[in-house]
Image (tube, helix red, strand yellow):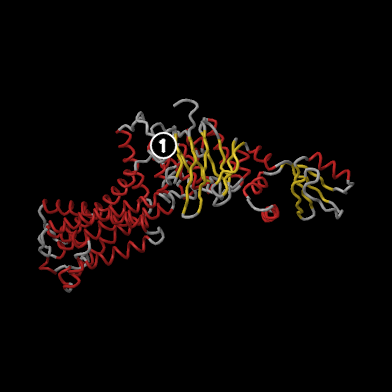
Amino acid sequence: MSTLVSNEVKMPYAKIIKIYYLEAKSELLKTFRVPAFTLPSLVFPVMFYVFFGLIFNRDGLDGQMPAYMLATYGVFGVIGPALFSFGVGVAIEKDQGWLALKQCSAMPIGAYFFAKIIASLLFGLIIILELFTLGALFGNVNMTSMEWGLTLISLLLGSLPFCALGLWLGLTVKGQAAPAIVNLIYLPMSIISGLWVPISIFPDWMQSFAWALPTFHLAQLTLAIQEFHLGYSVYIHAGVLLIMSIVFLLLATRAFKKQAIA
Amino acid sequence: MSEQTPLIQVSNVSKKFGKLDALCDVSLTINQGEIIALLGANGAGKTTLINHLLGRLTPDSGNISIAGYKPGSLPARQRIGTILQSAKMPETLTIEEHIVLFSSYYLNPLPLAQILNIAGLTDLRKRRFKALSGGQQQRLFFALAICGNPQVVLLDEPTVGLDVQARRQFWQCIRELAQHGTSVLLTTHYLEEADALAEKAYLLSQGKLLHEGTCDSLKNKMGGKVIRFKTSSMQDFHTGIAGITQVQSRGQFVELVSQCAEDTLGYLFAQKIELHDLTVSQVSLEDAFLQMSSNSTPEHQLDNIKEAV
């Protein structure tokens, strides 16, 4: 190949920031204009929390059930948009040739992922605030402001490894199959990790199996803020999540390079 | 960059997919302001070549330069706009939102109004992608291809699946663009399209470039005129006599392809053959295309042509 010339005019920073801003704005507009996707992901986790946390098991764990489930349904709520926005969104745009066209344009690829992360974080944030409001108003959840804040941060940051998992899935599976596959991972993983009912009621072998699931570690991390966790060090859970993120990102990078050359 | 440097230079590029020769020693250049058609049947290697220019594929051997840059590099992507085959875009965004976003990727984008104008989308700017007809969708893809004010636009079968009117509207967009000095490389099955738009045509078959030149030179190379008539005489016509290179019978009509129409007509009149509805016309690019892209025997070519009728 010929040597590259270095006198190329560089994109000014202001323009780069504008790209990221417009990309994120477009992603949000695109997503919120599809109520069939938006509404279920904003409503389901909250509905489950109301049923299982505020109505049926209200007095479980010495009346602490609403506080406990705030953490676990929080995890359930934030990982949904992460898995779907990346897993299904990327799979469809890959199959449609839209991703390929963007890669052929002068778009910095980071902007594409940034926009999807912003969208999934915003979704996550809305779900968390819904849960917080319900828990505080109807569940007598009493946390210090520090604990509220840490729970929020744990859930938002904790959704990022699931963006990486979703990205890998989205780049690997077919667009038509993606919703089913993501659901097949999302729902069983959530149940076995104790996001719907406390993991302590599960038999031992199921609890050991849960160690292999990232949802388990994020749930334990978030529960630890209120001392509801099984008692293992938070560093172990955070470490496992970090390692899983790296593994999923590496897998995604490989899948990305493979699909770029169609 | 000096005036003489071609915008795109492809030198001796070869690419194998397994045992298949997808591209075989292909060389071509695209200069500023040229409209070039890349003709070929399915599987001829048109899309493979486009993917090499976009940096989506790398050649096994040979070189490609986009204004001195490596295909797929950011400076190369800044200079190229493209329509890929059969793409869809997010349905819930409007034309204007799509164009504004894509324009932001480029250093010196065209003004929004001008993009809408060239693509013929000004009145539809607030409409969402899913509410657009096939032709309008394709014009939006075209708008995204040109919004960055590229030096060259690569269009991979841009009018496939469009009806006649939509196709003509699309051609108008391409002509409009070429007037701005932008180079265009388009791949097409439609020989009419190459004839209507391109000054220069490349014919690609099984990964090899068979012809390079004007569309007229392609027709001339194929040779001459078609003489078509009805006759009741049972006369057999043979190739090799009076410049006749091909004999075809199409229903009631006989068609003779001739290197020299004057000689052939002289021969027909001299033989006192009864002729009705006589017409003499230029060989269509369709026939030229079939003849040149087929490496088979003349009988086989005849079959091809008959099948195409």
Tell me the SS state at disc 1. Answer: helix
Residue indicated by mark 1: B76
Q: Is residue A143 left or right of residue B274?
A: left
Q: Is residue B270 left or right of residue A124?
A: right
Task: Examine the rendered structure and indicate whether residue B3 appears above or below residue B11.
Answer: above
How many circles with numbers are drawn on the protein? 1
Label 1: how many residues lie within 10 Å, few (<14), some (14-19) or many (20+)? many
Residue A163 visible: no
Q: Is residue B292 left or right of residue A127?
A: right
Measuring from the top left, give residue B159's x and y in whole percent: 56, 46
Going by the numbered disc 1, the residue's amino acid type is Ala
Residue displayed at 34% across by 44% down: A109
Residue displayed at 90% across by 46% down: B272
Measuring from the top left, give residue B41's x and y in whole percent: 58, 50
In this orientation, which residue lies closer to the viewer: A88 or A39? A88
Q: Name the quarter where the N terminus of chain A is drawn.
A: top left
Q: Is residue A88 left or right of residue B40?
A: left
Task: Examine the rendered structure and indicate whether residue A165 appears above or below residue B193.
Answer: below
Measuring from the top left, give residue A57's x and y in whole percent: 17, 69
Q: Chain of mark 1?
A: B
Most extreme residue toward the bottom, as rendered? A203
Residue A133 quadrant: bottom left
Measuring from the top left, give residue B139's x and y in whole percent: 51, 42
In this orientation, which residue lies closer to the viewer: A32 or B193? B193
Residue A13 visible: yes
